[in-house]
Structure formats: C-alpha cells, structure tokens
Amino acid sequence: MGKNAFLFPGQGSQEIGMGHDLFRDDAFSKSLISLADELTGTDLEKLCLRGPEKTLAQARYLQPALVAICLGYLKRLQDAGISADVVLGHSLGEITSLAASGVVSYEDAIRIAGKRGELMDKVASEVSGGMLAVMFMPIDKVEELIEEISEGGSIVLANDNAPDQIVLSGRTELLEKFAQIISDKHLGKSKRVNVVGPWHSPFMRDARLEFEDWAENYRFQKPVTPIVMNATAKTESHPSTIKHLVTWQLTSPVFWRESMETLRESGVDTLYEIGPGRVLSGIARVNGFRKETLIYNINNLRGIESAVAGA
C-alpha cells in the first residue's frame, strides 16, 4: 500500500495574492495571520495580497506569513480527511513541518518562524548577499568552481535540490562572478533566487547561535507523524535532536535530493505540496518521482477539492 507525504515550501515560493481564499472566510487561518501581525507589527494579510513584493520578500515578514498560509491549507486538507505518513519542508518549510508532525503547536510554529525571520533579516542588513540556483551542472563541477573563486567561505553550497539543481549562497559579487563564469564557459544555467540574504551559509553563524538560545524557551514533542529533517535527510524522532537540527539548519545545507530518496525508499507514491507555488512538485519529478506518482498542489482551496476527488 502506498504512502502520502506532505511537502512544505520555503522562501522564494511566495507570490502576491497568496492565501487570498483563506483570508476571506477561514477563521483558523485568520487567527494565525493575526498572531503573525502581532509579532511583526505589520498587516501581513494586506502585504500578502497587495505587496509590494520587495517588502514581502523580507524574511521577518515573509517567514511567519508563509508558515501561517501553509498551515491554513494544511488544516483544510486534514479536515477533508487526508493525512500524511511522513512530512518534510524545504528550508523555512521545515518550521511548518514541525507543526504538521506534532512537534510544536501551530501557534508556536508562527512564533518560531517570526524569530527566525527577524534574525535572518539582521544578517541580510549587514551582508550584501543572496542565493543563486545553478542548473544542468554536475555537483562536482560546482564544487570545483566554488573552490576556485571562494574567499574564505564567502560562497558555499546551500541546497542540494536535485541532480540538475544546486543552490549557492554567499556574497553578491561572488555569486555574480560564478554566474558569469558558467555562462561564458557554457557550463550550465543560473538564476538568482528571490531571497534577500545568504541563507544556509557561514554568514548565518551568529544568527544560529542566537536562535539556539531563544529556542530553549520552546518544548519540542516527539513527532506524531514522521518528519524528515533537512540537515540529515532522515526521519528523526528525538525532540532535542529535532530542535538542534532546526537551529543548525541556518548554517547547514538543505539536503533535499537525499530527502527525496528517503521518501522513495519508504514507499511514498503520493505527494501533496502545501503552500504557494509549484517549486517542490517540479523538483520531485527530477528526483525520480515519475508519472506513476500522484502530485497534488495545495496552493488554493480548489487544489484541496482536486486532492479529495483523487484520493
């Protein structure tokens, strides 16, 4: 018998208008976004619906807002009778997966995302950095070029997403240099990721340490639903280990390709991408989830209707 996996997207998946159908009449979702409003001192519903996009991309606003929206769709999906055998989230999405697995409450997931975003924005204000997606270039060649141009860890591998997609993080000028080299030498393709800082890199060390201290105030529970962690690409069950990996993730790469292998090996044959966009659905196909795998995009309420009809 097949298994279901819930996937939660991270930063870069946001879009103006996200969550519009939840904000209309979903009391639960409105309570979550109201909590995020209090944490940020901002009308996040208005920001999500109207922008501006540059402000929405700021981590202190985007992270609690995106987690709130994903959790709103998650609850509607669960209320419709669909459950998961395993959950995982990409980068920020891992915070959403904590709530989906029962490790923390929905409200605490919003609080954790808010603090995470606040600390990450602080780094972004101090470092001119970002992230660069590199496609169709073997990972060993990517690592060779990083070694060639990196200046003391100023550019690193941040996400191993798929056999043909790696994401780098670091100083803006080095990312631009990397992109220019692979273009000039026809080594592959590249595209800047819609984030405002050098996430999953050594630049995040101080933020990680502060995040670790702050997270001591929160009690993590043993997962009710198995959760695959970004930093190990394995299911983890001990609350203290999960907490450590969540905070460690700020400086650790996201091993998404290996996480997808973990899902395949466990017998998952139906994926639900819950949240804005379709990024993780596309990456799943590249990672070996072929036509026989059902993939549902839960980025609006119509997506839930389609998922229920196909269940």
Image (cartoon, rainbow, N blue to C red):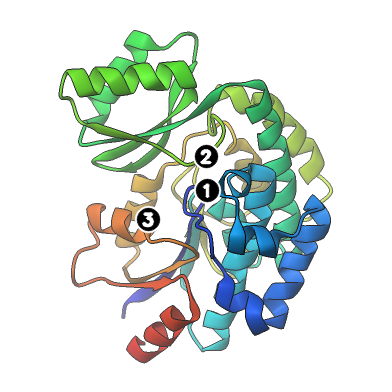
Examine the rendering and report whether any part of residue 222 can be seen: no
Closer to the camera in the image, 41 or 298 = 41
Examine the rendering and report whether any part of residue 108 can be seen: yes
Residue 188 lies, in percent from the top left, at 20, 30
Q: In screen coordinates, is 177 left or right of 219?
A: left
Label 2 crowd bin: few (<14), some (14–19), many (20+), radius 10 Å: some
* Amino acid at the residue labelled 2: Val
Q: Is residue 100 above or below residue 112?
A: below
Residue 293 quadrant = bottom left
Closer to the camera in the image, 49 or 137 = 49
Q: Would you name the residue on which mark 2 appears?
A: 195
Query: Quadrant where the C terminus lies?
Result: bottom left
Residue 279 lies, in percent from the top left, at 37, 55
- Secondary element at image label 1: loop
* Amino acid at the residue labelled 3: Val
User: Marks 3 and 2, Cα distance to the nearest angstrom?
Assistant: 15 Å
Q: Would you name the residue on which mark 3 appears?
A: 279
The disc, 1 or 3, on the residue closer to the chain's N-terminal end is 1
* Amino acid at the residue labelled 1: Gln
Callout 2–callout 1 Cβ contact below 8 Å: yes
Please state which of the two labelled residues, at mark 3 or mark 2, is closer to the viewer.
2
Per the rendering, the mark at residue 11 is: 1
- Secondary element at image label 2: loop
